[in-house]
């Protein structure tokens, strides 16, 4: 096992495991337990009012507390706080299995590249849903392992844009487990939260787009998830995912234009 978080000195292949959390007491311990292989664990606590800090301190002394209005800002702050030459980003609802942990450690020791994507196994409740994710409502892979300085988050509140420096290497073989939604109600609640945040970004940009353009995107995004990404193979779950992805732009647009007085 690698040195615990907070110990000084780190090899060229050292890995900082970074978790950014807001009130994640129910899921944080399971996530951090799976990150003990890393050379350090860094936890960013954003306006937590539950037991997240107490739980995090069982695993690490490397804790950054603060209040960030923008998702990209808090993630960049966490990356800057990491001391390792490599950073692994994981969320509280994600789990790194033993095979992936070994692959991450080996990749950090031997890779000549700067960024590696990690495949994602997405779960709705206890069901693994492999097909149909995408179009800003789910991810089949993400750039989760990278050399410090090779990845920068944009300043959007939701789905921040990414900027990369250096060379992108091959995708890892072993997936991270992502418990993305408890059930369909949770998925719809996530759509509501995401579109509210996206609406704030659209208002801030001064260019929310047009009604016609976003109506057209309903059909293109549904096709992308349900047909092109084979969501139909998941039955009803694939249909719901495709519908949420399809409605994401138009709901964001309507919230941005019809609810302008909201902060």
Image (cartoon, rainbow, N blue to C red):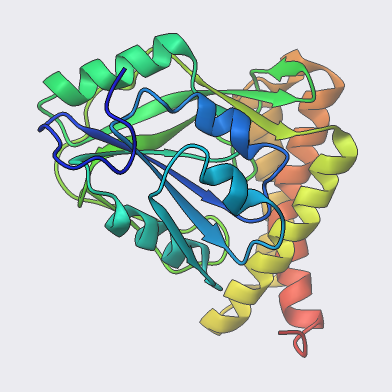
- Asked if one can make out residue 208 in the rendered structure from this viewpoint, the answer is no
Residue drawn at (20%, 26%) of the image: 108
Q: Nearer the viewer, residue 151 or 224?
A: 151
| 69 lies above or below 46 | below
Task: List the single residue furthest toward the bottom.
Answer: 261
Dividing the image into 4 quarters, which one contains the N terminus? top left
Task: List the single residue furthest toward the right.
Answer: 185
Q: Position of residue 200 (x, y in %)?
A: 64, 75
| 139 lies above or below 195 | above
| 256 lies above or below 2 | below
Dividing the image into 4 quarters, which one contains the C terminus? bottom right
Q: In which image quadrant can residue 64 be found? A: bottom left
- Asked if one can make out residue 255 in the rendered structure from this viewpoint, the answer is yes
Left or right: 132 in relation to 107: right
Looking at the rendered structure, the number of numbered marks drawn on it comes to 0
Residue drawn at (52%, 39%) of the image: 58
| 94 lies above or below 186 | above
Q: Nearer the viewer, residue 9 or 72?
A: 9
Residue drawn at (75%, 59%) of the image: 193
Task: List the single residue furthest toward the top.
Answer: 99
Q: In which image quadrant can residue 87 be found? A: top left
Q: Nearer the viewer, residue 78 or 163?
A: 78
Q: Position of residue 31 (x, y in %)?
A: 56, 31
Residue drawn at (13%, 39%) of the image: 9
Q: In which image quadrant can residue 244 be found? A: top right
Left or right: 73 in relation to 40: right
Q: Position of residue 120 (x, y in %)?
A: 52, 25
Q: Position of residue 90 (x, y in %)?
A: 48, 37
């Amino acid at each position: 096992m690698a040195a615990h978080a907070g110990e000084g000195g780190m090899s060229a292949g050292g890995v900082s495991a970074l978790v950014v959390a807001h009130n994640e007491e129910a899921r944080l311990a399971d996530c951090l337990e799976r990150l003990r292989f890393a050379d350090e664990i860094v936890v960013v606590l954003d306006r937590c009012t539950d037991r997240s800090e107490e739980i995090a301190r069982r695993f690490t002394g490397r804790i950054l507390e603060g209040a960030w209005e923008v998702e990209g800002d808090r993630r960049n702050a966490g990356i800057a706080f990491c001391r390792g030459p490599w950073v692994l980003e994981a969320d509280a609802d994600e789990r790194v299995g033993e095979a992936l942990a070994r692959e991450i450690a080996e990749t950090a020791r031997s890779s000549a590249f700067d960024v590696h994507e990690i495949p994602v196994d997405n779960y709705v409740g206890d069901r693994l849903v492999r097909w149909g994710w995408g179009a800003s409502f789910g991810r089949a892979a993400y750039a989760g392992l990278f050399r410090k300085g090779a990845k920068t988050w944009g300043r959007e509140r939701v789905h921040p844009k990414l900027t990369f420096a250096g060379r992108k290497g091959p995708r890892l073989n072993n997936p991270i487990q992502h418990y993305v939604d408890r059930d369909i109600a949770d998925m719809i609640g996530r759509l509501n939260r995401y579109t509210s945040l996206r609406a704030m970004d659209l208002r801030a940009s001064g260019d929310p787009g047009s009604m016609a353009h976003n109506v057209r995107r309903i059909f293109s995004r549904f096709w992308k998830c349900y047909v092109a990404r084979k969501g139909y193979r998941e039955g009803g779950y694939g249909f719901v995912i495709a519908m949420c992805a399809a409605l994401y732009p138009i709901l964001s647009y309507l919230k941005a234009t019809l609810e302008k007085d909201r902060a």
